[in-house]
Image (tube, rainbow, N blue to C red):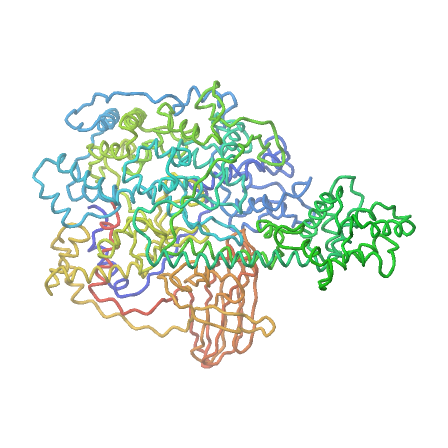
Amino acid sequence: MIPIRPHSLIVGLATSLLGGLSLLMSPAPASGDDRPDTWPPESLDFFEARIRPVLAERCVSCHGDRKQNSGLRLDSREAILQGGQIEGPAAFLDDPAGSPLLLAVRHELDGLTMPPDGKLPDPVIADLERWVALGLPWPDDATIPTPEGIADASETHWAFQPVSDPTPPEVSDPSWVVSPVDAFILNRLDKAGLRPSPPADRRTLIRRASFDLIGLPPSPEEIDAFLADPRPDDQAFADVVERLLASPHYGERWGRHWLDVARYADTKGYVFTEERRYPYAYTYRDYVVRSFNEDKPFDRFILEQLAADKLGLPDDDPDLAAMGFLTVGQRFLNSKNDIIDDRIDVVGRGLMGLTISCARCHDHKYDPIPTADYYSLYGVFDSSTEPDPLPVIAELDDAGGPEREDFLRQLQERKDALAEFERSKRDEIIQDIRARLSVYLDGMLALNSSGAPDGERPGRDAVDNVARERDLAPRRLSTFLTKWEDLQSRTKDEHDSILAPWHALSAIPADRFAEQAPGVIDDLLGNPERPINPIVARALREPGPPSTFAEFVGRFASALSSKEDEEGRAEVEALFVPEGGPFSIPIAEVTRLLERDERNQHTELSRKIDELQANHPGAPPRAMVMVDSERPSEPVIFLRGNPGNRGPQVPRQFLELLEGKDRTPFTDGSGRLELARKIADPENPLTARVMVNRVWMHLFDRPIVGTPSDFGTRGDAPTHPELLDYLARRFVRDGWSIKAIHRLILSSNAYRQASVDRPEAAAIDPENLLLWRQNRRRLELEPMRDAMLAVAGRLDSRLGGRPQSSPSDPDGDRRTLYSMIDRTFLDGVYRTFDFGSVEVSNPARPSTIVPQQALFLMNSPFVARQARELASRVTEQAGSDDPSAFVGRLYHLLFGRAPDTEELALALAFLSSAAEPSTSRSSPWRYGFGIFDEQEGRVASFQELPYWSGDSWRFGTEYPHPEGRYLRLSAGGGHPGDDPRHAAIRRWVAPSDGIVRIRGRLSHDSDKGDGIRARVVSSQSGLLGEWTVKGSRTRTQVDGIPVRVGDTIDFIVDCIGGPAFDSFEWAPTVLLASPGGDIARWDATSDFTGSASPPPTPEERYAHALLMTNEFLFID
């Protein structure tokens, strides 16, 4: 192993890290040119989908290559940063919110409003704000092909041509070729004048294969068995590979790779007040794991993920969960067009390496994919719907018993509560119509006289105005109008004892009503064969005939509204019965008629049902399927992506690029199954190439095609095109078997090369594109964390199940695959260790080295817990009090080898001389929640948060918590609860008398939601400062605050109104000047602590250090 050996780290950190001190590190300042070498794919996708169309349609006509008003161009990133002749840069990367471009489109610059022909819609402005905040991501447009060049690409671009069937080439050293793969690799090395590296030693090889195939380290016993196997390396290693491929952990490792492609998460993203979690996303995750373990043919895997509902599976087949591939994406505030775009994108990039979504607003700028083809696929997914309820699927393990019974009981209780609420609101609405019938009828008459054409209903604005003038809810008035019109229509041509007077009197002209009404009433009341309801009859007679129709309406309404027990009352009551009466309202319609407070109550009751289904261990699994709509959609092109600007109709069909001009439209329902078959067709030139390229990438840390999800003309050319086609052909011939491809590649000498650098080879091929050695790489988050659990003896090896707590939770013992993935509040450890994007299909994870990674490894309670358990396990297994035995067993568990002489000597020296950790002053900080009394300007209540998760204080083990929701406080910030009763409060308790100064910066990074409000409140002086931020930051400074010992200063953050996107950063510093002039300083970040735990022993500190070494954290 070439990188840092354990003893190097121990020497460097023994007096700091191992003594228990935190090491604070800061990244280097950004340089002036901060364009990254490569933009994250989701950033470029966002630009292409949301920004480029706006610039093209609304900006570049005045600020492009032909015309530059004020010398400003907006057709390249460099031009935007350079700016115009007058205003200067149009965007400030260090102060995005203050960018002139954004101020202009928000109309916040005096005399400068852009575009001049009208303000952009708010969502478009929000997209521009996000774009600037991301750093203006912009692809390299240096060579945009001509339309003719794009059209020719279908005939000339390598990826769009049929997969060839190459034979392994001749090479200089046939003895090195033990797999066809080797021939292709060595052939390229020969041409470059390079030689392959020697094979890795057996210990390195089993560790490499173990992490590559199952994501876990080999046990010491497995290493020893492989080292002792007397057979040749090829045979012995083949058995290792077979054992790993048969392991149930294989599906967990390779399933996680696929979940990156599928943009898997357990939540929907921002959905305002709707329940954020997908209760059943985990069934898709478990399906993926199971499919890889079963070596399900990849073509079948595709069919099931796009159209399992159309494959004739039993109604409860667990494979129905496959369709989570389509349905676990973001929900974009339930914007149908964005949801469908996300599904087109995951199918296009995930399965075929095509950026089809780039054709949403215009023909693809690089590939022969016209907008018409995008909307053909749009029609496929627009013709599919998600059923409610989702189908229950069979459980592979028995999950009944008391937990299921408790779930069913609680579910029924919550459903009953929701149903009772809906029934009560329905009855309230009907009773309101009855009690205020005169007002409703008056509103109807006002609308009838509003001038709407005969036979047409008044417009929405007219209904809104009339309703508000009469203190009515507009939707309820509109519903009443519909019900009343239906009632009139049903009774117009037949005698109705209640409505007959209405029909007769409403036919009298208004100017002759007083003259004609008495006669009409006498006729109505004088015909015993057509009796009038006694209550209505009395209203017609007493105190005499009405002189106007309006007077009649008032009497009529009063008579029907009364509840006196009199003759004819039963007939009147029948009008207002909740079910079956003329004014009855279907329960399904009730939610539309609720007022705001009532809608919030309804949402909360619905959320409790979703929450139970998401969290209760007894809830049966359901599949997040799609089914065909009753009538397929006939899609049209949305010109420039605008649904309101509809263009020509297009059929639902496959891409012309891949099927040719003679393609036929889909005819089987939505067309999802036909689409899946086209993608999984062995003759499709993309599907097999894309998948084998992904497999290769995860085994060599570099794909053959450097852009795994973009095989179009903008993508990278393959480094080994013949090898790529050989693997694709072999993949299909072997029945689309992923395990067969693994056997083929892992058996090669190319895979088994050592990773040692060779300067003479690096001089020719510095990036190792030709694979003259294996690539050394750091473990991703999942195998890193899982390996720590494994060596500590704590790994829970159960497969599947509902998502667990945060991966940084020190008590967590499931594989990281099963940790909760929250799109809105993604746990910080995911971002720290380069987790894949959960917003879009993720082609490959970046690999960064940042200070936060070292800080996590040194200071994380999770790592400390594993070190403690590891030391305890080693002590028990060593079977001796001899420190040498402890060190030897520790090395064997972690590295599969014995320590060398120098390592053992350094370890023994440390264990014998390690000092006890120093004690620190007691912390004045408290972490809790409470209520701020706005009238008094003080905190009305404060309760400490009861649960420490390992990196933050929370309400409990569940997150989000049923009561506290997303309330948390961490070292740098946190998140408030969903209402004013659960404001996040970081409390500082004065340890002595003095004068306090406060410094800090409040930051809210999201452009969604309504922002957050922060306050500083003293127990003695009350409110000291208040700030509101949304998508911005501000300094929080307060001076001259007198305190006495025991006084409190509270740093309070609440959600303002909407409980979403309220994560914040606020880590204030408190400076206390004593009467004697001494100044003490407390910093919220560096002082942040969790639950008290005993200081680590020397053995635990030593184990902690070894967990952080390159030998443990890297695959050699």
Name the residue at the left extreme. 230
Residue 397 in view, yes or no? yes
Residue 1004 in view, yes or no? no
Measured as percent of width and height from the top left, residue 522 is found at 86, 52
Nearer the observer, 389 or 665: 389
Count of labels shown? 0
**Horizontal side, residue 1099 vs residue 1056: left or right:** left
Nearer the observer, 884 or 233: 233
Q: Quadrant of residue 73?
A: top right
Q: Quadrant of residue 872?
A: bottom left
**Horizontal side, residue 89 vs residue 347: left or right:** right
Q: Is residue 1052 above or below residue 33?
A: below
Q: Is residue 940 above or below residue 61?
A: below
Measured as percent of width and height from the top left, residue 293 is found at 27, 40
Measured as percent of width and height from the top left, residue 1050 is found at 49, 71
Nearer the observer, 944 or 887: 944
Name the residue at the front extreme. 529
Measured as percent of width and height from the top left, residue 272 is found at 53, 52
Q: Quadrant of residue 349?
A: top left
Nearer the observer, 273 or 536: 536
Quadrant of the image for the C terminus?
top left
